[in-house]
Amino acid sequence: MLFLLFGLQSFAQNQVSGIVTGADGMSVPGVNVLIKGTLTGTTTDIDGKYSLSVTGPEDVLLFSFIGFETQEVVVGSQKVINVVLKLSAESLDEVVVIGYGEVRKRDVTGSISKVKESENVSRQYSSVDALLQGRSSGVQVISNPGSPGGAVSVRIRGTNSLRGNNEPLYVVDGVIISSAGEDVLDASTDANEIQAPQNGLTGLNPRDIESIEILKDASATAIYGSRGANGVVLVTTKQGQKGDGKAKINAYGSVEFSLISKKLDVLDGVGFAKYRNEVALQEGNKINYHIEGDNVYSISYKADPETGLELPTISDVPYEQKNWQDDVYEMGITHNEGVTVSGKGEKSNYYFSAGFADQKGIVETSRIQRGDIRLNMTNHLSEKVELDTRISMMFQDGSFAQSGSKSGGNRSFTKQVLSYTPLVGYESEDSSDLDLDISNPYAWLTDYEDETKELRINASTALTYELAKGLKYKIQGGLDYRNKDRSRFWNTGVFKGQMQNGVLAMSTLDRYSYTMDNLLMYNKKINDNHRINTTVGVTYDGSHAEASIYEVSDFPIKSLGIKAPELGQIISQPYDLISTEESILSFLGRVNYSLMDKYVFTVSFRADGSSKFADGNKYGYFPAAAFAWRLIEEDFVKDLNVFENLKFRMGWGKTGNQAIDAYSTLKNYNTVYYVDADGNTVIGNAGSNISNPDLTWETTSQYNGGLDMSFFGGKLSLVTDVYYKRTEDLLQQIQIGTSNGFTSMPINRGEIENKGIEFSLDGVIINKKDIALNVGGHISFNRNKVLDLGLASSSVWNNGVESQEVFYLGNNVSTGTYFKAPANVFMEGQAVGMLWGYKTNGIYQDDAAAAAGSTYQGNANVAGDVVFVDQNGDGNINELDRTFIGNPNPDFTFGLNFSFNYKRLTLSALFEGVYGNEIANGNLMELGYAEGNSKNVLENSYYNAWRPGAPSNTHARVGYDLNEVFTDRIVEDGSYLKMSNITLSYDLPVKGTGFDNINLYVTGKNLFTLTDYSGYDPQVTSFMYDGTIMGVDWTGTPNARTFLMGVNVTF
Amino acid sequence: MMGAMLGACSLDEDPTFPSSEILFSDVEGAQTVLNGCYSGLASFGYWGADFHHLTDLGSGMYNTNKDANLKDIAALNPYASQNYVENVWKACFSVIERSNDVIDGVSSADFPEEIKADMLGQAYFLRSFSYFNLVRLYGKAPLRTEPASSVNVNSPLNSADQIYELIIADAQKAKESLYATRADGRPTSYAANMLLAKVYMALAGNQTATETEYWQKAYDEAIEVYGNFSLVSDYRTLWLEESSNYSSESILEIAGNVENTLRQLQLFTPSNGNLGRSVWGRIKPNIEMYDQHAAAYAADPRLEATFQTEWLKYNSAGKAVVQKTYPVFKPRQNKDKSYPFLAKYSMKNTLALSYNTNMNLVAYRYSDLLLMLAEIENELNGPANAYQYVNEVLDRARQSADTPSAEPADWSGLSQEHFREAIMAEYNFELLGEGHDWFNVRRRGYAYFKMHIIDAHNNTASYDFSKSRDVEYPDNERTILFPIPATEITSNPNVSASEQNPGY
């Protein structure tokens, strides 16, 4: 208006006109055009056109627009001056989301990784935690894509806490999602039946993710206070991109084929028959198998009525020989399709997406069908008011193959597939029906159901009001609603169902969490030297969860399975509704101050009040401070002409972890049951915990130093971080004497430390018009140590030397016969969760050596037995002889990626790996010994077993049955290098077709894994949320190798 | 806006489960806490299953088809981290903790005195009952008489004497507070008398009446019970699901129903011995237990009611084959057949599909009291007046067949020593598998135990100790007690490894 006024005042002498465009050729409206040194000027119209009278050729026109470099043009003799604006260097600055706000990348002071992945690849993942795998330094992800919907575990910078859950905090568009590791309760009253966990981070489709920022150090995470200690993953979903008001539509579809990636070599039918016969002869029994060529026949015995001798009869029909892994694991076909529509108008932008996936695993019964939609909208209600609304909904319906039960054996599907007899007879001579026993692999497919339904709604709305220039008030409300139910039915073909004539366990979770943030943000640049970016706020987070469990058994009609709980005649777990309310009230503030663009200071503070703790302990305070020095702005660095960027960062902060159950400070009562004189069930109440009113959060202090460098005009960049963190007042569930009536008690006690160094390198090797090659890689070293546990010490023997050590042992791995012992020890001065068991030293080769060896729990040895190392030299092996037999913590983890682009073709690949950790391969406890029972074993265990005259120092004799204890014989190197993803994509030529882009791609996932680990997969997914069991592969399921083809169309 | 929000924020916890204040605010609530004690008693770790695992398999009188147990606990080679050694200790203390909670809550509650006395009586009884198991099985234990809280965890071990002091005091209180008769299945004052009689007999050990007053004390308690119960006419009906609960000779029962099943049928029915094939056949008597009984009274109807020597084994198609065990089947290597099963708790309805049952477990039975009285009387005054008690039991045994048997004949003309020998054996014949075995064979000391259990077993000619099914017992005095569980030693800083029982 003002310019217009001035324009009218001057009398036209020379008229100059033109169009202002951006680098992309689009016209730019609203650009200020001014004659330098005057107040005369105009602005470009909607088409980017302007027209202006100048006084003479010596006039200089200034073109300025926010975000672009101001340009000066001498008028001269020109009548038409068209200008192409260049983006200003400042706006080229990436903006980084840091929680309750964002800063320019150059002003970042903490350790923050940004994860970027192409749409084609990110859409292949079904959850954001799985997507993180191998993509950032300091982030270790464990998942098994072979089990769709299975749980995923993410660790940022090592094990921070001795409590179960070390999962980071996820924040999606500013709303805290604390559901990683959350699941329905286990409804089964059977303590031996462990429910395989499922992924808790549902409802966020990686397709919709614009960016992921991982806050790793405390100076960055302290703004999340009592929940920031395990790191924070900030996810920002997509918005409508700038455009001409026209909708951008993208449609995609893919189909994926999954195959088991590795099989284990168990005995075939003939080998198994030999094995069983050898066992029978050893026991002094008659043999039961006749082997003729490749066929095996049963031998039965009948007493001759005259002589009384037992005469053998060989059956006419040979056994059916099964390779159960071949029979049960099949190709799973998954398809996934969806559409996104986005656009941006003058006052609003929107992003809408919808998708459907039908995911099948490598076991017939594992399948997930999932549909989801999202709508993100931003509206500028006025110049000062912006309303941002994001809603997503997801529904999924899945059935899962039981990956395992804590007691293993015939309660576990995966184990039965390996150890069930490969020789199957027929029900009778003339029958074609196989005579299959309880919990045979087929029974697991037909007689076990595990159905899950889940609805997830995430919604947030934020209203931002610009109170004054640079001062904004933002109020944001967020909702995370999760409704999940899971029903499991064991029919009589599987062990648990057989015991009780059919069992149905049902559990539900109905939980809503909400956040309410009130933020005041001030962002001001005071001349060129000072820039200040502050946030203060009050937030309130609440959660209300209702979980229910119910179990019935004894089904006269079983065919309806999970659909008919009313058919269960015995209520073994009456309907139990457990509701939990939690809330956190917080006050937070942060100042980010940049001086001369060289020195950046960040100070933050958060006070959290948590409902979980008793009065007096409710509030915790979490300060942080950090400093960054942008050395690149210093002349002495500039003059070196080496660096494109050089920045030094250091920071310190305190964060917390309050991952204890609500109500832990109060005495809880559980409902239990007894029976009255009439045989009716009566209700009882029994104390279920020792309350500890003194509980408070554990606190982690972390120091971080980092260096960001880039060279060769930014073609090579290196980020290095070193950190040291120390967690105090560890929330522990310490074991207490069972004479207390309870086995454990929650307490704040002890300290652990993690220290590490991370490198992340990105290089642009070639960057030409038609050809480009980018490579990147990262490597992270983390060392942790238990500093203090606050327990009494006890004796430990190592190589005949006794020492007093302070330690506690992890939970028992199993409740069954095998591995009913802890695998891990948490000992002061040692790494967290060292593997703890018996050292062995080969096999006793002869009776003399066996007799001279130490007894095991008082039992003498014979030749062919395993040699246990007697740590205390008392001639007997017992618990006191356990020692360190491995370290489950890796020396380092790493990832590598590259992308190569040639014209329309792009090839990208991602590798990830772990080095130097050890795994207790629980499967070997049974499969690794020819124990002599009716279960199948690995070929090696039988063929290479010690025998008189055929000595072996690697495998025990046939019939050796001391294999249920945890020894170093099952500890293996867990290092691996895995090709996680390789994608080749091609852009079809689209000129004249009306399409903006058509892209075809093929992907291979998990194509190969280099590892010495002999189990299914070195990524161990057993016990992911039990912090006291580490590196134990107990219920490990096979992984899948996947091939995928997809198409992606934009118009 | 902010103010409104702050006003709405509450950081107080308002739990949805009952608190102590709520539970002990009225009688009905307090009763549920008391029910919780019984629930603990009936739990899998205690009378529901593991008490039988521990005291049967560990007694030296049983075998098992569970190979891991065969090598350790059933071979009289228990160790501190052994499952059942840990579980029973834990379960006893769980009942003690719950009882302490009741005692603490009810003592200060404002209930009518009579109700209060009865509830306290029950809690004292249960605490006494569990400590009595602990002191006999483990020799010593921490004394816990207050509900556990974060400030009183981890008590040191107390001596057997101190524990017996509490057991007696608690049982005395129970005796005074409990009703003599009641219809709710809960302990009566007679159950407390019987508990005390057992306590005094345990304290008397192998001493004679001239050496200790405990026989007299035991008599004073046991005689209180005498005549207040009666033996059922047929021994066999004690083991039928439809007639076993609350019979006329039941003095103390632990209750279960199909929803809250005690696992005796699952533990004792031969594996695949029902159509649903849902049982384990885990605990079976040694063959010398059969031999001794058959040698004493070959025609005792109790033999058939106690030992299952023939059973139906079902295959997956639902067909059943008859299996004959020892004494018909003699070879030593067969899991199913080399040992007889215990018929008392073997499922009678083999067509059942699950192991769930409404059958209770009878912890104290009147015939046990009669045998106790006979033993006590013999110790105090010799056999003359003792016959009447044991003969009552023997007479009933004779009647427990379709046509009454001549055996076991009434006793007469025994010396005091002979009577003692015979009555100790009679416990095994009458009460095998009912939870008393481990205690009865040990309470007269190691020499008695060695002779009657270890040597009797090792000298049984039918065994072939080269076969894995048969296990030779060690001559090791430590087996008179179980070890203090490893968890207690490692997790309780006030219990040190040096306090472990001798020999472990």
Image: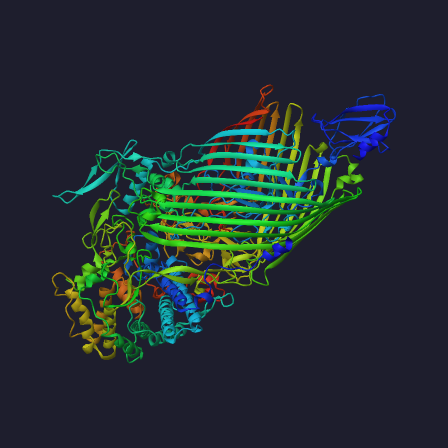
Q: From the viewer's perspective, is B353 left or right of A603?
A: left
**Horizontal and vertical percent for residue A703?**
66, 50
Q: Is residue B264 left or right of residue A100?
A: left
Residue B458: x, y in percent?
27, 60
Q: Quadrant of residue B3?
A: bottom right
Residue B158 visible within the image? no
> In which quarter of the view is residue B212 placed?
bottom left
| Residue nearer the viewer, B389 or A879 | B389
Residue A479 appears left or right of B264: right
Q: Residue at x 16, y 66 (%)?
A: B408
Q: How many marks?
A: 0
Q: Nearer the viewer, residue B307 or A524?
A: A524
Residue B414 lies, with reference to residue A707, above or below; the image says below
Choose between A699 and B65: the one closer to the eye. Answer: A699
Q: How is the image coloured?
A: rainbow
Q: Is residue B87 visible?
A: yes
The image quarter in which residue A77 lies: top right
Left or right placement of residue A194 versus residue B386 in this view: right
Nearest to the observer: residue A953 or residue B33: B33
Which image quarter holds the C terminus of chain A? top right
Q: Residue drawn 68% across and 37% down?
A: A94
**Position above or below: A665 against B328:** below
Q: Position of residue B40 (x, y in %)?
A: 38, 62
